[in-house]
Amino acid sequence: MKKMTELLIAGMMIGGLGGADTLIASQDSEARAELAAKIADEQARAISLIFRKPEGEEKPWYIPNFTWSDVNVNYLDWTSGTVDRGGGAYKDFWYLELEGGAGWDWGDFYFFTDWENPDKDFDADDAPDDSRWVIKPILDINIPGTEGLMKNIQLHIQDYYLYGDGFLVNNLVVGFAYKYISENFFARPFVGVHYMHDTFHSSLWNGYMGGWVFNYDFQAFDQKFSISNWHEFEWKRDESTYLNDDGSRQEFGDRSSWGVQGALAAWWHVTKHVTGGLQYRYSWHKLGNYNYLNGVIYTLKYNF
């Protein structure tokens, strides 16, 4: 009711000042100047009554400061060496992806979900030609009370979940991240403890994981481009994940106490809504194989 009354008064003020020119014209120069200043103050006050933020009103914590999202189609082309070293377990495939993110005063959230081989069936007997789902959410929460450089340190939680018929893997990491943002550069290194569960191993703490994400934007030939990289490194894995009971290396799997994976990408932002990219995908002692694996991902995005 108070707000409505203020709006009515403001409207009356603005509307009632319509004859100000006539009133000013009937005064001498000094009086006209004084009256003009008074009317200007009243106009400013009337406008502020209309557009001011109500006392005590704050943006709800769950409404983000920004959001972004895109849908993309990808084709992963493994190198011939990877296909040979993989013993038939790695074949080229395409996948659909939905990704997005949001930011608040209290932190940031990012996720992607992939549908690999969407034209195939969920049939473990046909692996690796079967259809699979991947989901990866990442949550970074600001630490209250931190100042200066420490203000950019966040509680970091990420989870990777892959599901296919007859196989699943879940990798949870809890630790800390550091966020750095400049005009055209973003970086977020992180480190944390690693919890793993998959079809072949019971749930266990599986050492540590660290890594980073960075993105660099630039312009060339009147076009917008960017370079990005995500990288993860695991170490101090539980011995049950790579050694036999007699201490020998297991025949299958990552087969090492450490592993690394990631992708280095180049992006061409053709328009506001269309982005094309090439990603160099790599892994070593990861993705269920002891050997170095690499390939190229061709990506086309539609940005909402």
Image (spheres, grey):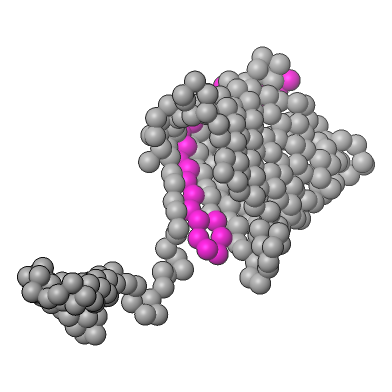
In the rendered image, residue 51, in percent from the top left (x then y), is placed at: 28, 69
Magenta-span inclusion, residue 93: yes
Q: Is residue 261 left or right of residue 121?
A: right
User: How many discs mark residues in the rendered view?
Assistant: 0
Which residue appears farthest toward the bottom when viewing the image?
A: 2
Q: Residue at x 40, y 80 (%)?
A: 56
Q: Quadrant of the N terminus?
A: bottom left
Q: Nearer the viewer, residue 129 or 295?
A: 295
In the rendered image, residue 274, in percent from the top left (x then y), is placed at: 40, 30
Q: In the rendered view, would you say 279 is above or below 142?
A: above
Which residue appears farthest toward the top when viewing the image?
A: 80
Q: Quadrant of the C terminus?
A: top left
Picture quarter containing residue 86? top right
**Residue 10 visible at all:** no
Q: Residue at x 63, y 26 (%)?
A: 280
Which residue appears farthest toward the right when viewing the image?
A: 246
Q: Residue at x 50, y 38 (%)?
A: 114
**Residue 209 visible at all:** yes
Q: Is residue 101 left or right of residue 253?
A: left
Picture quarter containing residue 58? bottom left
Magenta-span inclusion, residue 126: no
Q: Is residue 235 left or right of residue 226?
A: right
Q: In the rendered view, would you say 250 is above or below 168?
A: above
Q: Residue at x 44, y 51 (%)?
A: 67
In the rendered image, residue 72, in percent from the top left (x then y), is placed at: 44, 33
Picture quarter containing residue 139? bottom right
Q: Is residue 237 left or right of residue 149?
A: right
In the rendered image, residue 277, in percent from the top left (x then y), is placed at: 52, 26
Query: What are the residue bounds of the magenta stretch?
Result: 85-108
